[in-house]
Every structure is written in structure tokens, then in C-alpha cells.
């Protein structure tokens, strides 16, 4: 049995329906004017009729500029049914952080989910590492003849 796969949806047709001013001919003309990745009418019709297996990044950029959207608007994603959360405590923590960020408030104190202990400040340097200012410049950045940084 093969593993379940995520489902990616191609939403170009939906975006065109929302932007009623674009016919296929107009979209072809706009893509040509954009110039990054010209498409023929047949290619655009194929893009509207079925989900492509691959989409060149230049075409994604052209479509986003023309339709005034983001790549997230062009693609939808549905995770497979059997997804296993490998770190449920962190997932809950991240979800809570997103809620707070959307609500506009980030407090100094954070309520951690059960089972997650705060990081001991004495261990921070060992786990996170020293700040960049505390580190000497890398040897590759030095001019060996002058003994100074480039």
C-alpha cells in the first residue's frame, strides 16, 4: 500500500472567475505583455482546464502580477488523512502563538502546554549558542597578508 499523499489544488480558474475582466484571450495578452514566461492560447486553455504537474516559477510570478494575487491564491493544499503530528506540544504552542499574534498581543509571559518546560536561562548559551557579536570573525573573511578583515 502506498503512503497517503497531500492534495494540491490549482486555483487559476477560480481566480479568473473572481477577476471577471479577464477572458482567456486577455490573460494570454497580459502574460505576453508581462514578458517573463509567454504562453500560447492553447497553453493557457490547458492551464485552466486541468491541474498542471509542474508550473514554472516565472509563470507563477507573471500570473501573480497580472491577477494581483500571491502564490497561495494560485494553489490550495489539503494534507493527507493519516498525518501524524510528531511534536504535538509544539504544534499546540505554535497554534496559541498564532492566535495571540492575530489578536495583536504578544506578552512577555507565555503559557506553555502541559509537558513543555521553559528553557533554563543558564542553559541558553549551550542550547542556542553565543550571540554573533561575541564570536570572532571567520578566518575566511581575513586578508592573510594584512591580518585584517576584508
Image (cartoon, rainbow, N blue to C red):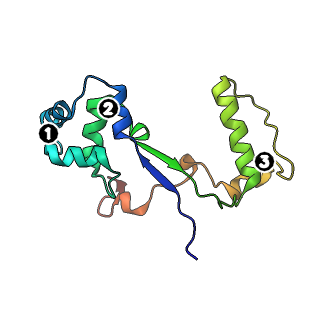
- How many angstroms separate mark 3 from mark 1 (CA)? 54 Å
- Classify mark 2: helix, strand or loop: helix
Mark 1, residues whose alpha carbon is within 10 Å: few (<14), some, or many (≥20)? few
* Residue at 64% in and 55% down: 129
> Mark 1 highlights which residue?
35
What is the x, y in percent for residue 33?
Answer: 13, 33
Q: Earlier in the sequence, mark 2 or mark 1?
A: 2
Q: Which mark is residue 61?
A: none
What is the x, y in percent for residue 80?
Answer: 59, 58
Q: Quadrant of residue 64?
A: top left
Mark 2, residues whose alpha carbon is within 10 Å: few (<14), some, or many (≥20)? some
Front position among marks 2 and 1: 2
* Residue at 32% in and 32% down: 16
135 vs 36: above or below? below
Compared across the picture, whether 1 is left or right of 19 comes to right
Q: Quadrant of residue 48?
A: top left
Of residues 110 and 25, the one drawn nearer to the viewer in this rendering: 25
Q: Residue furthest front?
A: 49
> Mark 2 highlights which residue?
16
- Classify mark 3: helix, strand or loop: helix
50 vs 21: above or below? below
> Mark 3 highlights which residue?
121
- How many angstroms separate mark 2 from mark 3 (CA)? 53 Å
Compared across the picture, whether 115 is left or right of 20 comes to right
- How many angstroms separate mark 2 from mark 1 (CA)? 19 Å
Q: Earlier in the sequence, mark 2 or mark 3?
A: 2
Check the picture and name the quadrant holding the N terminus. Answer: bottom right
Amino acid at each position: 500500500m502506498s503512503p497517503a499523499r497531500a492534495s494540491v489544488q490549482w486555483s487559476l480558474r477560480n481566480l479568473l472567475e473572481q477577476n471577471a475582466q479577464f477572458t482567456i484571450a486577455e490573460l494570454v495578452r497580459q502574460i505576453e505583455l508581462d514578458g517573463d514566461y509567454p504562453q500560447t492560447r492553447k497553453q493557457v486553455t490547458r492551464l485552466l482546464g486541468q491541474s498542471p504537474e509542474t508550473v514554472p516559477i516565472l509563470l507563477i510570478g507573471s500570473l501573480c502580477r497580472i491577477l494581483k494575487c500571491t502564490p497561495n491564491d494560485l494553489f490550495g493544499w489539503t494534507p493527507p488523512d493519516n498525518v501524524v503530528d510528531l511534536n504535538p506540544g509544539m504544534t499546540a504552542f505554535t497554534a496559541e502563538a498564532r492566535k495571540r499574534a492575530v489578536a495583536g498581543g504578544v506578552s512577555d509571559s507565555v503559557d506553555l502546554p502541559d509537558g513543555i518546560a521553559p528553557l533554563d536561562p543558564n542553559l541558553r548559551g549551550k542550547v542556542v549558542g553565543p550571540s554573533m557579536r561575541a564570536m570572532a570573525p571567520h578566518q575566511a573573511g581575513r586578508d592573510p597578508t594584512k591580518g585584517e578583515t576584508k
